[in-house]
Image: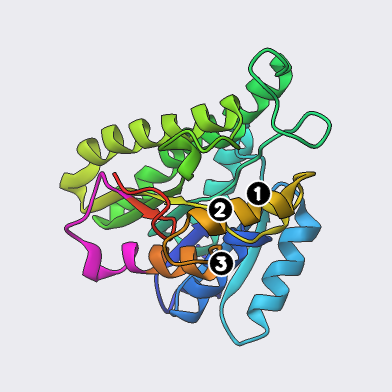
Amino acid sequence: MHESIQPSGRVALVTGGSRGIGRAIAAQLAADGHIVVVNGSAQKAAQDAAGQLAGSGAQVVALAADVSDEQSVASLIAEIERRFGRLDIVVNNAGISPRVNGAKPTVEATPLEHWTRTLSVNLTGVFLVCRAGLALMKRGQWGRIVNIGSIAGRMNTGFGSAHYAASKAGMIGFSRVLAAEVGRFGITVNCVAPGRISTDMSASFGNATEIDKIYIARTPVGRLGSPQDVASTVAFLVSDAAEFITGGVIDVTGGVFMP
């Protein structure tokens, strides 16, 4: 028996939804009438974000989980099923990019624990969340999975570390295979690959201001991206209007990357 809160719209899970791009995505999906589950590894941060987003009258809940941990993800999906009985949209946004002394490490200078943890969160986390959530999507014969990648998984930017680039490139390959497997169930799987986006994470580099200037000079539209630029793209991909788009990569880079 489900709790009294019942979906008036589709149920969307946004991992890494407490700040930056994830928060903007959660806000957009809530504004579009979806019930949004804001996930983060820290319960307080997720609760704070959910509370602020719910202040507009939207239905937003916070559920903490470590996406790199199989049991934690299983518990997350089980709780979503218990509360709502369904899961329609998954946005895999949780991601990390460890630095060494505040800067991108070379391959030789990358600690093994940084490599392992980055792939565990950025890539294994996507696998675990998708694998656990697919049963609920199949039950409804409809689903949208959007995996937030990066320009670093599409090209050598000169600023992306090897562990981060590898995790984002791997996400693209994973998404294509999954899209082929689940399309007959009415489920689409796509990636969004942002360029340089103004977030706390991008600003945390020691030479962030210099990197910003370089990106703006390279970008045909002449500015950095905003979290809302990514959120608007995700909102389209999870809509009914995008039902014939699957296995794709949408580059939100302002033209820095043109394949």
Query: Disc 2 marks which amino acid?
Result: Tyr
Examine the image and state in which quarter residue 61 appears.
bottom right
Q: At label 1, which amino acid type do we have?
A: Ile
Q: What number is the disc on residue 199?
A: none
Comparing 103 with 99, the one in front is 103
Are the two marked residues, 1 and 3, in contact with CB atoms closer than 8 angstroms?
Answer: no
Relative horizontal placement of residue 97, taking residue 171 as reference (left or right) = right
Please name the residue shown 74% across and 64% down the image.
47
User: Helix, strand, or loop for circle 1?
Assistant: helix
The answer to whether the residue labelled 1 contacts the one labelled 2, judged by CB atoms less than 8 Å apart, is yes
Q: Position of residue 48 (x, y in %)?
A: 76, 68
Judged left or right of residue 153, residue 204 is right
Q: Which residue is mark 1?
A: 211
Q: Which amino acid is tagged 3? A: Ser
Q: Which residue is mark 2?
A: 215
Task: State which mark lies toward you, 3 or 2.
Answer: 2
The correct choice, above or below, for 163 with respect to 172 in the image is above
The location of residue 6, given as percent across then percent down, is 48, 74
User: Disc 1 to disc 2, how far (Cα)?
Assistant: 6 Å
Distance between mark 1 and mark 3 Cα atoms: 15 Å
The answer to whether residue 182 is above or below residue 169 is below
